[in-house]
Image (tube, grey):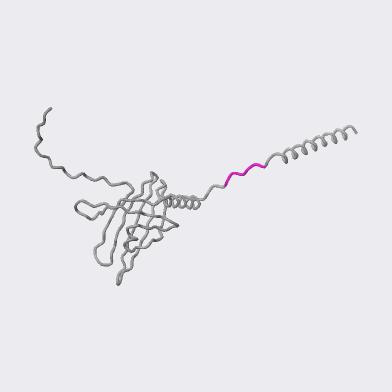
Amino acid sequence: MKNKYFVTAVGLIFLIAGLAMVTEAAQKPAAVAPAAAKTPAQLKAEAIQKAQQGLSLHEWAVYVTSTDSKGKAATETDVLTFNNGKITSRNLLAQGYPESNYGLAVQDDGTAVWETMQARELPGEVDIAFIRGALFPNGVLSGTIIMQPQKGASKNFEYSTVKPQTTPAPTTTGTPQKGKR
């Protein structure tokens, strides 16, 4: 009979210990499961959204230079505006080219690369402007504009938010005058 009490006592001890562990576990906060890793598609979508926000922060004043001229290339300014997935060039808008949608991709180094095509319709012809560009992680925006008229030769331009270096015109030097010291 002593064995019977002993077995019952040991059983009760295990039962009480088990209940204590269950009660303690119930009182602890649940462990937070680690966040699921993002898929490459999710990471790409986030990078594109971040790049679109970066482009849309403000109007981009750019310096446009012809790459076709043989002599000194003239530089003019333009303003590029990115808004709701569309781009507008102030200079091209003045010439009749409307805003257009642009495609955007983000490279592994964080560079946002985009491109668009704008068309202006004239009586009997359609002229096209191809605009490509990149927003680099250092904040510089640069690219190319190719003007492809239906009639005439195409014109190529480069643009950047960094003003191109200009070479100063040579100065004429005369005979130095002797002055009093």
Quadrant of residue 17 within the rendered picture? top right
Picture residue at 67% right of the left edge, 42% below the top? 30
Q: Which residues are magenta?
A: 30-35
Quadrant of residue 181 within the rendered picture? top left
Picture residue at 58% right of the left edge, 45% below the top? 35
Q: Position of residue 124 (x, y in %)?
A: 29, 72
Vertical placement of residue 47 versus 20, above or below: below
Considering every residue shown, the one lying at the far front of the view is: 180
Left or right: 135 in relation to 67: right
- Please tell me which residue lies in front, 151 or 41: 151
- Quarter containing the N terminus: top right
Q: Position of residue 152 (x, y in %)?
A: 24, 65
Q: Position of residue 134 (x, y in %)?
A: 37, 51
Left or right: 23 in relation to 1: left
Quadrant of residue 167 within the rendered picture? top left
Picture residue at 19% right of the left edge, 53% below the top? 70
Vertical placement of residue 95 versus 34, above or below: below
Residue 129 included in the magenta stretch of the image: no
